[in-house]
Amino acid sequence: MAAQFGRRLRKGATTTAVAAVAVAALSASGAPGTPLVGDSGDQQSAGTAPSPDSGVATGNSPYYTDLPPLNTPNKPGTTTNLPVTGSAESGIPASILAAYKKAEQTVADSDAACRLPWQLLAAIGKVESGHARGGRVDANGTTFSPILGPVLDGRGFAMIKDTDNGVYDGDATHDRAVGPMQFIPSTWATWGQDGNGDGRKDPNNIYDAALAAGRYLCAGSRDLSLAADLDRAVLSYNHSDAYLRTVRSWFDYYKRGTHEIPDGTGANPPGLGGGTGPSPSSPDTTPSPSGSTKPKPKPKPTPDPSKPGGGTTGPKPTPTPTPSQTLAGVENAGTGTLTATAGTAFAERIKVRAENSLGGPLAKVSVTFTVSGDTDAAFSGGKKAVILFTGADGTVTAPVLKAGEKAGRFTVRATATGRSLPAVTYGATVTARQADAIARTDDKALTAAPGAEFADTAEVKATYKGAVAAGVAVTATMITDTDAAPGTDAAEPAENDKGPYFKDAHGKTVRTLTDLKTDADGTLKLPKIYADDTTGTYRLRLTTEGGATVVIELTIEAPEAPAA
């Protein structure tokens, strides 16, 4: 299906009012509403879409109105298997797909309640720029030349005077939408993001632009799993029912499944060649009073007098990489065993090497390091994923990895960002904080009358190799006088069924506590201890993570009778 541009002829408040009346008329006419393709829990809306929030990200610039192929893929497990190959039109270039998914994960980490699906970013990226001209981006995710919308000078489009002094769009008089997600400069100034961790916020970088779009769509308290909130979010991006229906159709298509294609092989929508988007003066189309587009004969190319032979100006073809410039994969560059105690930094740093097709090092390769698994470990700054670039020797070292409080194993993966190449996987282990010694901080006798509460309680201090052992787990157990119950390991004394006891959160009698931890200076003050009616001397055993123990005596005795 040939690409067409959606156009809104918006001139000031008058045109806005006309547009509003048209939308209202569409609702009143009983025209079919926007198809809703969210999860089954979506609340369906009828008629025209709900009103958007104030302002639009793109300045209502043109967009591509192509619809998805008729043979839509299905999710795995249905009658049709998820395709792994297909047309360039229906696929998503590798770097672009990686950027959408990375943005989804980044937003989920900080705003899980929004429930941003990467397929929504893909749908918007498709209609705004054809996925960055079919994935024509460099290894960092930046377009080879800027993608610019038309000049927003009020002639066929909105009137938006310059807000960035031409920094992003090269126009110091009026604004133009910029980049694969088509942000106008004033919106980018507020919502721009650094999605690839290179220290820059570049609207022509797909990682930056996709993350910015995700943040923008999640503005306020939106929950994009609800149809009404999703509609509002899309309309806040471009205020048009037709735009919403187009985005929704691609969203539906991508939610059914899609396939990855190599960068640069996607369909390049007409009008995006040479680094600019569709403009009012585009020879391909011309707006009519009704807002539709009509084909217009293409003018013959004008010879460029500055070039011998009268060559025409236009985009230069992308050079084919040589074997020494072609990424073959990433490999472990000597990373050792990854182990750390809870709350400490891993001494070993993860290091990978990028190789070209000749087996040599390859510089400036984007590598994504991701912490995954049931863990609270993270890189410096609390980041679960970071993107870095290889140096001249082809290597790159991940930031310091810090263990959280949760013990156990997890995984760190290093991948060539946006490439369908095998990942390097590292296993990492966090061990619980340990103590090799524990002792009372005083020697005060601990006594209580039958059925009463012990007036004093014990305080202990744990150390590891002579240093304070903070955050160490401690188990407290009221044990029998014998070392162990018959048939059990002598190293594990039996729990007593009489004498002193603790109370749990519900006031229930318990004689073992397992949720105790030493504080920042390694000390632990035991909770209140109660006595039952059985007199005698009892033992309380404290055991640390690491095996250190201390036994404390507790005495239940009747008070002395008063002298006659």
Image: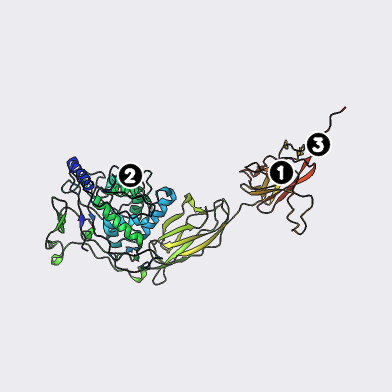
Three-letter residue code for mark 1: Tyr
Residue 533 is a magenta residue: yes
- Determine whether label 2 and label 3 are within 8 Å by CB: no
Callout 2 crowding tier (Cα within 10 Å): few <14, some 14–19, many ≥20? few
Please give the label number shown on residue 190: 2
Determine if residue 206 is in view.
no
Q: In the image, what residue occupies the spot 54% across and 55% down?
A: 346
**Colour scheme used in the picture?**
rainbow
Viewport quadrant of the N terminus: bottom left
Label 2: element kind: helix
Instruction: Please tell me which of labels 2 and 3 falls first in the chain.
Output: 2
Callout 3 crowding tier (Cα within 10 Å): few <14, some 14–19, many ≥20? some
Determine if residue 307 is in view.
yes
Please give the label number shown on residue 501: 1
Q: Is residue 267 above or below residue 104?
A: below
The percent position of residue 110, horizontal first and vertical second, equals: 43, 48
The percent position of residue 391, horizontal first and vertical second, equals: 41, 61
The percent position of residue 73, horizontal first and vertical second, equals: 34, 65
Q: Is residue 262 above or below residue 240?
A: below
Instruction: Please tell me which of labels 3 and 1 falls first in the chain.
Output: 1
Which quadrant would residue 312 be assigned to in this image?
Answer: bottom left
Q: Residue furthest front?
A: 30
Which range of residues does the magenta coloring cover? 529-534
Q: List the residue tagged with mark 3.
A: 558
Q: In the image, what residue occupies the spot 71% across and 43% down?
A: 501
Q: Calculate the distance from the C-alpha at mark 2 to the C-alpha at mark 1.
A: 60 Å
Q: Which of labels 2 and 3 is toward the front?
A: 3
